[in-house]
Amino acid sequence: MSFLGLANNQCISFNNLQDAVNNGIFTAIASIPVSGEQITKSAAAADIIIPNPDYPPYANKSNNQLLVKADIYNLGNFILDAQYGMRFTNMTGSVGGLPTFTYPVTGGNTTKTYNGTIAAQTITVDLAGTLFVSPAKVVLYVDGVQVDCQNITSGVQTKTLNLSVTVASPSTIKISINGGTCTSTPTTPVFSGKSFSAVAVNRGSGQYMVAGNSNLSSQPENWTAGYLYYSSNYGSSWTQNSIFGYWKKIASSDNGEYIIAVEAYGKAYLSSNYGVSFTQISYFGTNLFNSAALSSNGQYQMIVGGSSPTSYVWVSTNYGVTWNIVASDIYGGYISCAIDSSGGTFLVGAGSGGSAYIIRSTNQGATWTYVLAGSNYGLNTTDININATNGWAIAAWIGTNPSNGILYKSSNSGASWSQITGGSAQNAWTVSILNTTVSGLALYDLGTSGTSYIQSVTGPGPIFMNTVGNLLASPSLTWRDLANSDNGTYILAGTLNSGLYLSTDGGSTWTAL
C-alpha cells in the first residue's frame, strides 16, 4: 500500500516508508529494507530525516514503539507553534531594521515585538535545511494579521515576503511556516481594546465603511498609530488594509467608490476601489492634515491642513488625479471641510489662536466668502458637514474650555447660520453628522461630567434641527468619531480603547464589533 493510502492511525511498514521517499514526502538518509514489517521510532529515525522531531505525537514515543502515519505526517492548515514548528535558518530585509534571531529557529513561529519603526520592505526567508511535509507555506503576520503568504515546495531554498506597510511601535511581527497552502481568505480582525479616531460610511447606502485604528489624544506624545479596515457588507465583516498611520479623518463619496484618508503626520491616501487599497497622494510635501471631503460622485475632493503657522485648502476637480492650493491663511488653522452633492458648494471651518470662522466657495475654491465668525477667543470649528442632497449643514465648535462649545445649523448650503440651543446640549461637540430626514441628525460630544455622549438633534418642519437629546450615553466609553448613511439607518462610531460600535437601526441599538 502507498504511504498516502494509509489511514492516520495505521502503522507504517518499511515498504510504506520507501513509497513516501519515492514520492518526495520524506528524505532518506539510509537504505530502507524491502519489508512489510512495521517500523519503530528508532527505525524511522535511522532511515529518514524526521520532518519535526519536536512534534508531540512523535517526541512522546519511546524508541521501541511503533509509529502510525499521524506521528510523522500531519497535513493541515494549522499554525505551527514552537512545539509543532518546522525550520528556517535565516531572515534578511531589503531595507533593514529587522530583529536579530538565533538561528536555526526550531519553532515555526518566530516573533519579535518592535520598539521602533520598521520600513516597508521585502523579507527573504532562508529555507535551506528546512524539513517539512508538503504542502506548506511561509506566512508573515503583523499584529496577528496576515500580510503575506507564499507556498513552499520541496527543494526551494528561499522565499520572499512583502512587508507592505511601515511597522511602528508597538507592533509584533511573526514569521510562521504552516501546513497547507495559501488562500485569499482574510484573517478576521479583532477590534476589542483598539482605538478608532476616524471612521467613514458611504452616504448613499451605508454598504461601504472604512475605519482608522489610531488614538489621537490631546497629547501628541501619546498618540498611537494603526491600520485601516474596510467593510463592503454594511459592517458585517471587516478586512485589514495594509496602510498604516495616525488617522485624522476619512471621507467617502456617496457610493463609497472614492475614499480619502488623511494622516495627522502629513500623508494623504486615496482609494478608488471602495477602500480595498489606497495610494498615497504625494503632492502635499511635509504639510499636516486635518480633514477631507468629497462630492457625491468623487469628482470634487478637498483636503485641509498645513504646516504652522499657515493653513491651506487643496482641491482636486478630476477625481484626485491632480491637486491645487485654492486658499491659505497664516492667522488661523483650517480644521474641517465639507462638499455638497454636486461639488457646487465648498465649506471650510477654521480657528486656531483666534476665534472660529467658516468660509464658503461656490466655484470650487476660486473665491471665498466669510459666512460665520465667532467672537470667543480660542474657538475651533472641529467639524462641519453638509448634506449630500438637501443643503442642510451643521458645524460643531469647541473652545479651550469645553463649556464654550456651540452648535450651528444652516438650511441653505452654508450661506447663513443660526445656533442650535434647544434641549440637553452638552457643549463640548467635536464631531457632527447628519442625514436626509429632519429628525435624524446625529452627533457626539465628549461631555463635561465624565460621561461621553452620542446625541441626536431633532426638529420637524420649519424648526429644523433645534432640539438636542441623548441618543447614547456611556460613562465607560469615550467616542472619537461618527459616520452615517444618508437615510440615517447605519451609524458607525469609533471609540478610545473600546473598538468600533455599529447601529443598523438609526441609533436605537448598538453592537460592539
Image: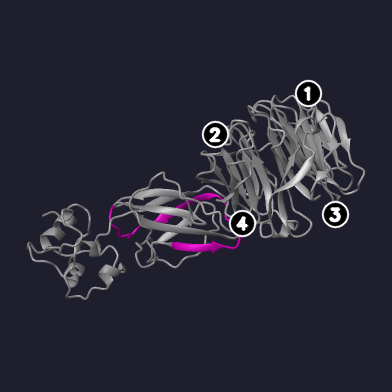
Residue 405: give x, y in percent of width and height.
83, 48
Q: Please give the name of the residue rendered at 27% of the width and 68% of the height, measured from the top-left corner.
A: 57
Q: Secondary structure at mark 1?
A: loop
Q: Amino acid at mark 3?
A: Asn
Q: Which mark is residue 363?
A: 1
As drawn, 345 above or below 131: above
Q: Amino acid at mark 2?
A: Asn
Quarter of the image that includes the N terminus: bottom left
Q: Earlier in the sequence, mark 1 or mark 2?
A: 2
Q: Nearer the viewer, residue 232 or 313?
A: 232
Q: Quadrant of residue 442?
A: top right
Towards the viewer: 70 or 478: 478
Quick check: is 265 in the magenta stretch? Answer: no
Q: Real-space Cα distance between discs 3 and 1?
A: 36 Å
Nearest-to-viewer mark from 1 and 4: 4
Q: Residues within 10 Å of mark 3 (few under 14, many from 20)?
A: few
Looking at the rendered image, the disc whose residue lies closer to the viewer, 3 or 1, is 3
Q: Amino acid at mark 1?
A: Asn
**Is residue 60 found left or right of 88 in the rendered image?**
left
Secondary structure beneath disc 2?
A: loop
Residue 226 visible, this angle: yes
Q: Which residue is mark 2?
A: 273
Relative vertical location of residue 265 with respect to residue 83 in this rendering, above or below: above
Q: Is residue 487 left or right of residue 18?
A: right
Residue at the extreme front: 460
**Residue of label 4:** 498
For label 2, count other residues whose C-alpha is less than 10 Å away and answer few (under 14), some (14-19) or many (20+): few
Please count the marks in the image: 4
C-beta proximity under 8 Å, tags 4 and 3: no
